[in-house]
Image: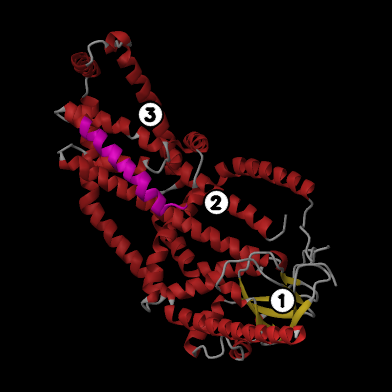
C-alpha cells in the first residue's frame, strides 16, 4: 500500500470521461439522492466536487474533522476501522455506493478511514453546501435531510436488532 | 503504530518553515503593497460590497429570481439610493460639515481659552493653579495640531486620489462586484479542483469557514457602526445639538476601532459641543450620558450579538494596527487597519487550526 504522504497532483478527469447524465444515473441509484426531482438536479450537481484518486490513496482518515459524504462514480473504496496501517477492514464499497454521509449532519471527527482500492472517481458533497441548499432552497434541503434521517434510523434499527441478537446469544452461552 | 498518513512536515522543520514563511510574508507584503495598493484598494472595495450584497442576492434567489436579475436589481436599488443621497442627504451633510468647519475657523482660540478657564475657575477654583493652566501656548499648539492634521489628511487624500479615480472606480467596482457575485461559486469550485487530494477536504472546509467569517465580520462591523452612529445622532438631535448628524457619523466611524475609537470619539464630540452648544454644562452632561449609554449598549448587546468571538483582538494589537495603518494610509488607514487585521487574524488562525486538525503539520 502506498502511503499518501506524497503530494500527488492527480489530473482531474475531463468532463467527457463521465457525462452529467452518467453521474445523474449513478446518483439516482443511491438511496440518498435516488428520487431527487429532476428540476433540482442541476443545483445539486453544481455543488458536487468531482475528484480522481489513485490506488491506495486516503480519502479521509478517522480522527480528522468530518466534512461530508462521497458517492463512488467509478472504482472501489474500503472503509477501515482506524487510521493505522493494519486497521481492520469494515466494508468494501463499489460504484454507486456512498460513505461519510453522517458528517453532513454532525460536526464530529470521522469515525473511520476511507481508502481507495484502485483508481477511483468520487463525487463529494459537503456540509457547507447542504447548509447553503437548506438556506437557499429549503425544499431540496429538507428533502435530503429527510433521506439522511431515514438512512440513520434504518441503521439504528439494524444496530438494535444486532444488539438484541448478541444479548440473546450471550444469555444462551451463559446458561 | 504507524498511521496511514503522517504529517507532511516534521515538527522542527515545520517551525522553521513557518517562521521563514511569516518573515517572507511580511517582507513581500511590505514590498508589494505599495506597488499594488491601488489594485488592492479596488479589490477590497469590491469584496466588501459583494459581502454586503450577497445576503440580499441569496434572499432574492430564494424567491425564485435569477442570480443575474437579482444582482442587477440590487445594483439598480443602490444606484437609486445613491441618487437620492446625492440629491438630498449629501448636500445637507456637506452643508453641515462646511458650516462646522467655518465655525471652527472662526473660533478665537484665546477667547475660547479664556472662556474655558473662567468656566473651570468657577466650578473648580483650584484646578487652573494646580496644573498651571496657562493659555499662552494654546495658539502655538493649535498651529501645530493644524499642521499635523493637514499633513495627515493629505496622506489619505493622496492615497485616495491615486487609488480611486472616482470615474474609473464607478465603472470598475460595479463590474468586478457583479462578477464576484455571479461567478464566485464557480471560481471557488475551480480553485478547489486544483488542490491536491491530500489537502482537498481541508481546503473546502477552510475556504467555506473563512468566507463565512469574513462575510459575518464585515456585515457586523458595518451594522454595529450604523446603529451606534444613528443612536448618537438621535440622542444629540433630541436636545438640539447642532451638527448631530456629523457627530453620529464620526462616532459610528470611530466605533470601528475597538477600545480606542470610542474613547477618542469623546474629543471631537466634546469640542463640537463646547463650541456650538449654548448650555455647555448641560451639553457635557448629555454627551457623557449619550456616549456612556451608547458605548455600554454596544459592548453589552451589539458586540456579543453581532461579532464572533474568534475575531477578538488584543488591545495592544489594535494600537499597533492603528499606528501602522495611520502610517501607511493616514486616517483612512487607521479606520481600515483593525478590520484588515481582524480579517487576517481569522484567516491565519483558521488556516493553522485546519493544518493541525487535518494532520498536515
On whether residue B303 falls in the magenta region, the answer is yes
Residue occupied by mark 1: A52
* CB under 8 Å between discs 2 and 3: no
How far apart are the two marked residues, 1 and 3, measured between alpha carbons?
59 Å
A132 left or right, relative to B92: right
Q: Nearer the viewer, mark 1 or mark 2?
A: 2
Q: Secondary structure at mark 2?
A: helix
Q: CA distance from mark 1 to mark 2?
A: 31 Å
Q: Residue furthest front?
A: A175
Residue B168 in sight in this render: no
* Callout 2 crowding tier (Cα within 10 Å): few <14, some 14–19, many ≥20: many
Q: Position of residue B114 (x, y in %)?
A: 21, 14
Residue B352 against residue A152 in the figure, above or below: above
Residue located at (71% from left, 66% from top): B196
Q: Are labels 1 and 3 assigned to the same chain?
A: no
Side of B198 where B262 appears, left or right? left
Amino acid at each position: 500500500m502506498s502511503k499518501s504522504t506524497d503530494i500527488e497532483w492527480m489530473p482531474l478527469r475531463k468532463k467527457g470521461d463521465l457525462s452529467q447524465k452518467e453521474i445523474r444515473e449513478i446518483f439516482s441509484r443511491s438511496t440518498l439522492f435516488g428520487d431527487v426531482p429532476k428540476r433540482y438536479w442541476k443545483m445539486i450537481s453544481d455543488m458536487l466536487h468531482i475528484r480522481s484518486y489513485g490506488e491506495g490513496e486516503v480519502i479521509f482518515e478517522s480522527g480528522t474533522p468530518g466534512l461530508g459524504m462521497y458517492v463512488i462514480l467509478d472504482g472501489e473504496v474500503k472503509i477501515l476501522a482506524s487510521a493505522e496501517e493494519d486497521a481492520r477492514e469494515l466494508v468494501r464499497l463499489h460504484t454507486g455506493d456512498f460513505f461519510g454521509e453522517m458528517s453532513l449532519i454532525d460536526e464530529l471527527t470521522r469515525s473511520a478511514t476511507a481508502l481507495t482500492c484502485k483508481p477511483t472517481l468520487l463525487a463529494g458533497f459537503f456540509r457547507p453546501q447542504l447548509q447553503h441548499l437548506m438556506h437557499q432552497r429549503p425544499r431540496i434541503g429538507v428533502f435530503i435531510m429527510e433521506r439522511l434521517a431515514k438512512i440513520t434510523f434504518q441503521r439504528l434499527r439494524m444496530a438494535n436488532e444486532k444488539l438484541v441478537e448478541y444479548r440473546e446469544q450471550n444469555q444462551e452461552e451463559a446458561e | 503504530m504507524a498511521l496511514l498518513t503522517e504529517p507532511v512536515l516534521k515538527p522542527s522543520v515545520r517551525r522553521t518553515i513557518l517562521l521563514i514563511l511569516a518573515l517572507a510574508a511580511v517582507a513581500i507584503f511590505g514590498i508589494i503593497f505599495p506597488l499594488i495598493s491601488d489594485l488592492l484598494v479596488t479589490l477590497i472595495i469590491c469584496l466588501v460590497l459583494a459581502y454586503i450584497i450577497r445576503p440580499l442576492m441569496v434572499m432574492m434567489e430564494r424567491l425564485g429570481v435569477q442570480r443575474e436579475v437579482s444582482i442587477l436589481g440590487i445594483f439598480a436599488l443602490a444606484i437609486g439610493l445613491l441618487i437620492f443621497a446625492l440629491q438630498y442627504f449629501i448636500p445637507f451633510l456637506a452643508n453641515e460639515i462646511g458650516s462646522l468647519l467655518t465655525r471652527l475657523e472662526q473660533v478665537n482660540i484665546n477667547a475660547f481659552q479664556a472662556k474655558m478657564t473662567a468656566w473651570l475657575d468657577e466650578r473648580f477654583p483650584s484646578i487652573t493653579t494646580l496644573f498651571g493652566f496657562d493659555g499662552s501656548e494654546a495658539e502655538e499648539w493649535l498651529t501645530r495640531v493644524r499642521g499635523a492634521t493637514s499633513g495627515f489628511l493629505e496622506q489619505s487624500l493622496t492615497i485616495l486620489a491615486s487609488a480611486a479615480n472616482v470615474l474609473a472606480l464607478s465603472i470598475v467596482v460595479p463590474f468586478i462586484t457583479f462578477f464576484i457575485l455571479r461567478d464566485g461559486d464557480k471560481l471557488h469550485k475551480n480553485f478547489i479542483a486544483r488542490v491536491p487530494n491530500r489537502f482537498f477536504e481541508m481546503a473546502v472546509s477552510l475556504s467555506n469557514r473563512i468566507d463565512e467569517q469574513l462575510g459575518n465580520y464585515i456585515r457586523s462591523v458595518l451594522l454595529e457602526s450604523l446603529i451606534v452612529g444613528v443612536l448618537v445622532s438621535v440622542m444629540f438631535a433630541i436636545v438640539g445639538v447642532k451638527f448631530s448628524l456629523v457627530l453620529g457619523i464620526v462616532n459610528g466611524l470611530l466605533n470601528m476601532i475597538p477600545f480606542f475609537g470610542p474613547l477618542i470619539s469623546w474629543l471631537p464630540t466634546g469640542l463640537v459641543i463646547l463650541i456650538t452648544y449654548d448650555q455647555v454644562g448641560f451639553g457635557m452632561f448629555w454627551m457623557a450620558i449619550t456616549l456612556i449609554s451608547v458605548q455600554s449598549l454596544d459592548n453589552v448587546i451589539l458586540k456579543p450579538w453581532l461579532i464572533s468571538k474568534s475575531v477578538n483582538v488584543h488591545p495592544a494589537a489594535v494600537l499597533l494596527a492603528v499606528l501602522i495603518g495611520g502610517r501607511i494610509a493616514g486616517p483612512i488607514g487607521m479606520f481600515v487597519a483593525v478590520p484588515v487585521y481582524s480579517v487576517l487574524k481569522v484567516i491565519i488562525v483558521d488556516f493553522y487550526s485546519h493544518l493541525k486538525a487535518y494532520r498536515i503539520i
